[in-house]
Amino acid sequence: MKNIVLFGPPGAGKGTQATLLKEKYSLIHISTGDVFRYNIKNETELGLLAKKYMDEGDLVPDEVTINMLKAEVNKNAGANGFIFDGFPRTESQAIALDAFLEEKGEKINGMVALEVSEDLLVARLLERGKTSGRTDDTDESKIRNRFNEYNTKTAVLKDYYQAQGNYYGADGVGSIEDITNRLADVFDKL
Ligand code: AMP
């Protein structure tokens, strides 16, 4: 199996690139943000819980997120591998993911990070908010809070995967196609 964590700050293009790369490598794309949004739309218990955090740009609690992620992986037994998009976002999530995969005799092959500066991203997110229908993309203070969450809780995961010799950075600025090609060069090696 090829299991890849696609990493990067909000708005870096993880979702766009994961959609293209999952086809190329026949992988299952799991976006925890998309799963939460699906649950919000369908007014499930999980959706109601997640909504109050997401609306503020806060992270959903680890336990809830980890259980949801495990269920999504288990739904896809027999997969060729996974692209994890938006997960893990905290060190506890990364530890839980490693332990969960190890139980299955699997591992993360690499964290592939889209590197883009924060100023460019805020502008991109506000632009996306005009068409995406995502309420967390329309209010600059909520966007700033998502970066705050990223910088205080998520950015440390670079060190976590680097310590395993598993971190690969890619320049996230340029055309969608150029970025896909850069990421594919890394995926090919994993
Ligand atoms: P995203 O679609 O990845 O930008 O995620 C949107 C929102 O969903 C985030 O701002 C969080 O509130 C929530 N979320 C998504 N993934 C996670 C995660 N791994 N841990 C905690 N919260 C998450």
Image (spheres, rainbow, N blue to C red):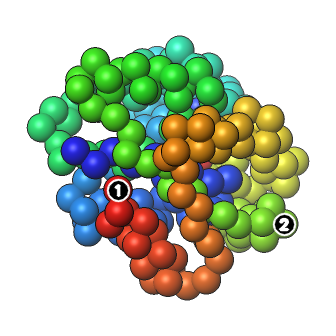
Which quarter shows the C terminus?
Answer: bottom left
Residue farthest toward the top in the current orientation of the protein: 63
| SS for callout 1 | loop
Name the residue tied to disc 2.
119
Relative placement, left or right, of 181 versus 156 is left
Nearer to the camera, 21 or 145: 21
Q: Is residue 119 left or right of residue 177?
A: right
Q: Which residue is mark 1?
A: 190
Q: Is residue 87 left or right of residue 148?
A: left
In the image, ligand 1 is in what quadrant?
A: top right
What is the three-letter code of the residue carrying label 2?
Answer: Asp
1 or 2: tag closer to the N-terminus: 2
Q: Residue at point 44% right, 32% down? A: 39
Quadrant location of the N terminus? top left
- Give the class, few, some or many, for how many residues have Cα within 10 Å of label 1's Cα (few <14, many ≥20): some
Residue 22, percent across and down?
30, 60
Q: Residue at x 23, y 23 (%)?
A: 104
> Mark 1 to mark 2: distance in Å?
31 Å
Toward which corner of the image does residue 23 lie, by quadrant? bottom left
